[in-house]
Amino acid sequence: MNPSELLYANWFNLVIIFVLSLVAFIYKKRTKNENFDNIIKYADILEKVPHSKYQMDYLNNIKKKLIWEKVCFYKSGNINKENIAISLINADAHNLIKLTQLDLLTQYFKIDKNHITPLKPYLITEVLFSGIAFVFAFIILLANIITMLSSPWIIDIIIATLTVFIIVTALFLFAVDPIKRFKTYLLILKDNAFLQRANDELAKIIEDKNC
C-alpha cells in the first residue's frame, strides 16, 4: 500500500487520532490559575496605603471576584444558577455533592415558579452531548475493531488499533466527571427529602432578597 492509498483509506482515523490527541494534551495541560492568593495578598497590602474611595472600591471588587472564582466553585453572573448552587449545598445534609461538581451540577436543575426542579435527563445539555458522543465513539470503535480483525494490511491494523486506544483513552478522560455528576444527580433524586430541603433554602434566599 503506497502512501496515497494509506492516507485515502485511513484519513478519518488519522484525523480522529490527531484531534483527540491534541484535545487530550490541552486538557491535561490546563491548570487552574494559582495567582489568586498572591493577588489577594497584594490587594490587602494596598488597602493599608491611603487611596481614593474609587480605588478602594476597585480593589475590593477585584478581591470579591477573585475570592468568588477561587472559593465558590461556580461562576457568578447567573442569579438562578447562584440560587440553585447555594440551595443545593445548604440542603446537602449527607455530603452527596463534591464542591468541584457544583458549577456544572447546577445545569441539572432549574428554578420554576420559585421552586427548584430537576430537569429530565434528555433535557440536560451535558447528558445529551455525552450520549451523542458515546454513540459516535461506539460506531467508530466498532468499525475499527472490524478493521483490526479483517484487514489484510498490517498498517491498517496498526492505525485501527491506535484509533481504538485513543478513543478509549479519551472516553475515560472526558466521561468520568459527567458520569460522577449524573450519579450525584440520581442520588439527589433518590433522596426524597433533598429537594424539599433545597426548596426550603431557596425560600429563605427569596425572602431575604425581598426584605
Image: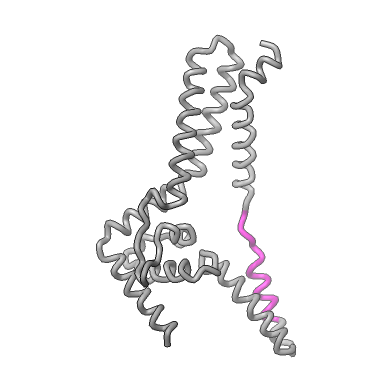
Please say whether residue 35 is one of the residues in the magenta stretch: yes
How far across and how far down the image is residue 131, in percent? 43, 41
- In front of the other: 147 or 35: 147
The region drawn magenta spans 31-45
How far across and how far down the image is residue 8, in percent? 65, 19
- In front of the other: 178 or 42: 178
User: In which quadrant will I find the N terminus?
Assistant: top right
Is residue 12 shown left or right of residue 144? right
Chief SS of the magenta region: helix
Please say whether residue 79 is one of the residues in the magenta stretch: no
Position of 169 relative to 109 (above/below): above
Q: How is the image coloured?
A: one colour
User: In which quadrant will I find the C terminus?
Assistant: bottom left
How far across and how far down the image is residue 133, in percent? 48, 39
Is residue 180 shown left or right of residue 48? left
Position of 158 relative to 19 (above/below): above
Is residue 13 shown left or right of residue 180? right
Which residue is found at the position 51% from the left and 18% from the top? 148
Residue 46 placement: quadrant: bottom right
Which residue is found at the position 26% from the left and 66% from the top? 193
- In front of the other: 39 or 101: 101
What count of labels does the image hold?
0
How far across and how far down the image is residue 127, in percent? 43, 48
Most extreme residue toward the front is 113
- In front of the other: 11 or 86: 11
Position of 32 relative to 42 (above/below): above
Residue 34 placement: quadrant: bottom right
Position of 193 relative to 30 (above/below): below
Which residue is found at the position 40% from the left and 79% from the top? 206
